[in-house]
Amino acid sequence: MSGAPITLPYLSGYAPEILAQVRQLIEAGRLAETVARRHSELHEVRTERALYDYVSAIKSSHMRSAPPLAKVAYDPKLHIVRNALGTHSQVSRVQGNRLKAKREIRIAALFKEAPADFLRMIVVHELAHLKEREHDKAFYALCVHMEPRYHQLEFDLRLWLTAQELHGMAHLPTP
């Protein structure tokens, strides 16, 4: 690598020791390989219907009392540069004399080709927002309840995004 400093936008806020380890993997050309080795399993959730079913299964397993979802979709407009890997929204409409809310989850289209673990992590994240709006202690507790490896998967997803950016968003090697 050249002498230019390596910026790690997806890893801001992590300890300097961890960032130094990531930089070493990058300089050795091993970041993509390391992530691919840990998360080699791909998923088959390619269509909107399959994504809706996938999200609904996780929701019914962990959040039966949460409001129903009107729509779940892959969204090609969501872009990681703006820190949006997924979104959740609530659209309220007046129907007669009642206010009706429809909830939607949109997942960045790049997750169609992502390892299965990362799709699960982002789905868990967006589902948690159905109950907890803020990224606070209760929010992360709910994420960990649905996916015990949540924090590790979030970190590994950030490594994967870094590797994707370094490789021009090309597909990463599999082990």
Image (cartoon, helix red, strand yellow):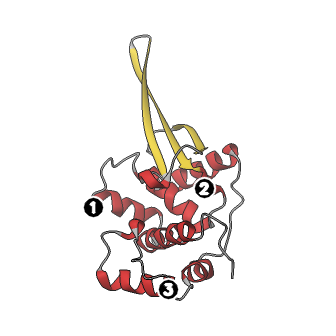
Q: For numbered disc 2, what is the local secondary structure?
A: helix
- Above or below, 64 relative to 71: below
Q: Residue at x 62, y 45 (%)?
A: 52
Q: Residue 44 in the image: x percent, y percent?
A: 72, 59
Dividing the picture into quadrants, the one containing residue 90 is top left
Q: Residue at x 45, y 87 (%)?
A: 24
Q: Residue 63 in the image: x percent, y percent?
A: 46, 51
Judging by the rendered image, the residue that carries numbered circle 1 is: 137
Distance from Cα at disc 3 to Cα at disc 1: 35 Å
Q: For numbered disc 1, what is the local secondary structure?
A: helix
Q: Residues within 10 Å of mark 2 (few under 14, many from 20)?
A: some
Taking the view exactly as shown, the residue that stands out farthest to the front is: 3
In this rendering, which labeled residue sits more in front, label 2 or label 3?
A: 3
Q: Amino acid at mark 2?
A: Leu
154 vs 41, left or right, is: left
Q: Residue at x 49, y 86 (%)?
A: 27
Distance from Cα at disc 2 to Cα at disc 3: 25 Å
Distance from Cα at disc 1 to Cα at disc 2: 28 Å
Residue 3 shows up from this direction: yes
Judging by the rendered image, the residue that carries numbered circle 2 is: 110
Q: For numbered disc 3, what is the local secondary structure?
A: helix
Taking the view exactly as shown, the residue that stands out farthest to the left is: 137
Q: Residue at x 46, y 68 (%)?
A: 158
- Above or below, 168 relative to 125: below
Judging by the rendered image, the residue that carries numbered circle 3 is: 27
Q: Amino acid at mark 1?
A: Lys
Dividing the picture into quadrants, the one containing residue 167 is bottom right
Chain-order first, disc 3 or disc 1: 3
